[in-house]
Image (spheres, helix red, strand yellow):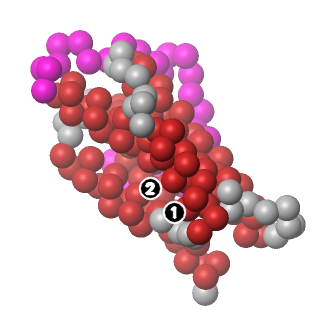
């Protein structure tokens, strides 16, 4: 499916109990290691992204704040996607994610838009890791969301 086929206006895609399954059986140790590293990276970066948006939101009633709330909620969905995948594979989130929580907090106050870096990172992880089809689809959807965020922020900056 083409990345343009994702509806990025959907902030929280529906999930059903049947969507969850045990993953990784029959995969080589090397493949599982790369999947673990990739999922931990994505989970950690989404932790940072949630906080970047969270700490940019002010009490002001504005269109920008509504967009930031929407983006934060979308990033929270991504965080949940990758946390669920980690557990489906029998992995745990990285212990260093607290550092990225703090980085997200700092970036939220000091920086405005870091989505382009996230999109490039998604592309590398999609290219370099042999994902199962369902996990790849989630990563591609989340990457499409990130690209949508870039377009949204660019329209606000004009």
Residue that appears at 58% across and 59% down: 106
Q: Which mark is residue 144?
A: 2
Compared with residue 148, is residue 54 higher up or lower down, i.e. above or below?
A: above
The answer to whether residue 113 is left or right of residue 87 is right
Q: Going 26% across and 47% down the picture, which residue do you hit?
A: 126
Q: Residue at x 26, y 18 (%)?
A: 24
In front: 117, or 129? 117
SS label for mark 2: helix
Query: Which quarter of the picture shows residue 34?
Result: top left
* Residue 9 falls within the magenta-colored stretch: yes
Horizontally, residue 99 falls left or right of residue 117, namely: right
Residue 81 - label: none
Crowding at mark 1 (Cα within 10 Å: few <14, some 14-19, many 20+): some
| 118 versus 90 height, above or below | below
Residue 148, label in figure: 1
Q: Quadrant of the C terminus?
A: bottom right
Q: Position of residue 37 (x, y in %)?
A: 28, 35
Quarter of the figure with residue 38:
top left
Q: Is residue 2 visible to us here?
A: no
Closer-to-camera residue (105/66): 105
Alpha carbon distance from label 1 to label 2: 6 Å
- The answer to whether the residue labelled 1 contacts the one labelled 2, judged by CB atoms less than 8 Å apart, is yes
Element type where label 1 sits in the image: helix
- The residue depicted at 63 percent of the width and 57 percent of the height is 53
Principal SS element in the magenta part?
Answer: loop
Q: Is residue 131 above or below residue 21?
A: below
Q: Which residues are magenta?
A: 1-30
Tell me if residue 132 can be seen: yes
Q: Position of residue 111 (x, y in %)?
A: 56, 69
Q: Residue furthest bottom?
A: 158
């Amino acid at each position: 499916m083409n990345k343009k086929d994702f509806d990025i206006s959907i902030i929280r895609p529906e999930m059903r109990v049947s969507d969850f399954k045990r993953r990784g059986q029959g995969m080589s140790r090397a493949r599982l290691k790369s999947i673990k590293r990739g999922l931990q990276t994505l989970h950690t970066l989404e932790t940072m992204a949630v906080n970047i948006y969270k700490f940019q939101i002010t009490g002001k009633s504005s269109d920008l704040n509504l967009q930031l709330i929407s983006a934060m909620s979308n990033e929270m969905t991504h965080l949940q996607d990758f946390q669920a995948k980690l557990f489906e594979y029998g992995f745990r989130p990285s212990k260093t994610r607290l550092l990225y929580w703090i980085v997200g907090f700092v970036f939220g106050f000091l920086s405005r838009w870091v989505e382009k870096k996230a999109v490039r990172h998604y592309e590398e992880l999609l290219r370099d890791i042999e994902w199962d089809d369902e996990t790849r689809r989630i990563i591609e959807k989340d990457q499409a969301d990130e690209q949508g965020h870039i377009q949204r922020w660019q329209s606000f900056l004009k």
